[in-house]
Image (spheres, rainbow, N blue to C red):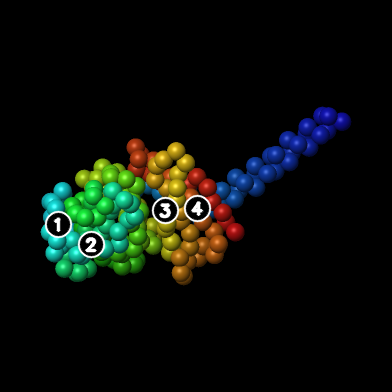
Amino acid sequence: MRSVRSAAGVALAFAVFSVTAAGAASSPYPATLTMQHGLTFSATGHALRWGTRLTAAQARWVTIRSSGTTYRWGVWQEDGVAGQFPVRSTDGGAHWMAAGPQLASDWAGGSLYYVTKVIGEGPSAVAMVSNSIIDVTTDAGRQWYQYLHAADNWSVTAHAVSGGGMGLRIGPASYATLPKASYAVYVLNVAHHQWHRTGQSLR
């Protein structure tokens, strides 16, 4: 009797594993998001040298700021024009410093790209996202990496990672072909410049 139950248990476990594996294989969310070095359609030059402190007049154009009491990130639009540049603050937003080249602001992946969300992760790391692009730095803006997603319309939000690190929760935005209530969780592998899917719900 025990051997019959054991065999049934193994069969059930294998069936569950097969369904899970099949579901993972057919997931609409990629298992890995590999970033490239640099920023697509970025201006060839910098508006300001890295670390340059913005004047009070310039700082009034810092928008879409991350939360944080000491270290904050934001997007600077010179005189309110279309080009967006990353900036950072080490004093809670009282003063801002240039932190990289112009972010993509042209047709990238079939859609006009502008940063819509700034997800800060301390003094050195931030993700600046839209519904099709994820721009990341982990060295305070000296180098930037980008993942360009043109296959669907994503909504990207922050996801807390147990033990620290940078995480994102990705789900469908308007006009997306993904299941309406679905989502996937990704955690950044800094050394390999990749986001790895660590969980998902395909309801």
125 lies left or right of 173: left
> Disc 4 vs disc 3: which is toward the camera?
3
Q: Amino acid at mark 3?
A: Ala
Mark 3 nearby-residue class (10 Å; few <14, some 14–19, many ≥20): some
Residue 158 bears which disc, if any? 3
N-terminal of the two: label 4 or label 1?
A: 1
Residue marked by disc 4: 184
Q: Amino acid at mark 1?
A: Leu
Query: Element at badge 3?
Result: strand
Mark 2 nearby-residue class (10 Å; few <14, some 14–19, many ≥20): many
In the rendered view, would you say 68 is above or below 154?
above
Residue marked by disc 1: 54
Q: Amino acid at mark 2?
A: Val
Residue occupying image coordinates x 31% and y 51%: 69
In the rendered view, would you say 189 is above or below 1?
below
Find the distance from the CA under tag 4 to the CA under tag 1.
37 Å
Q: Amino acid at mark 4?
A: Ala
Q: Residue furthest right?
A: 1
Residue marked by disc 2: 62
* Quadrant position of the C terminus in the picture: bottom right
Find the distance from the CA under tag 4 to the CA under tag 2.
31 Å
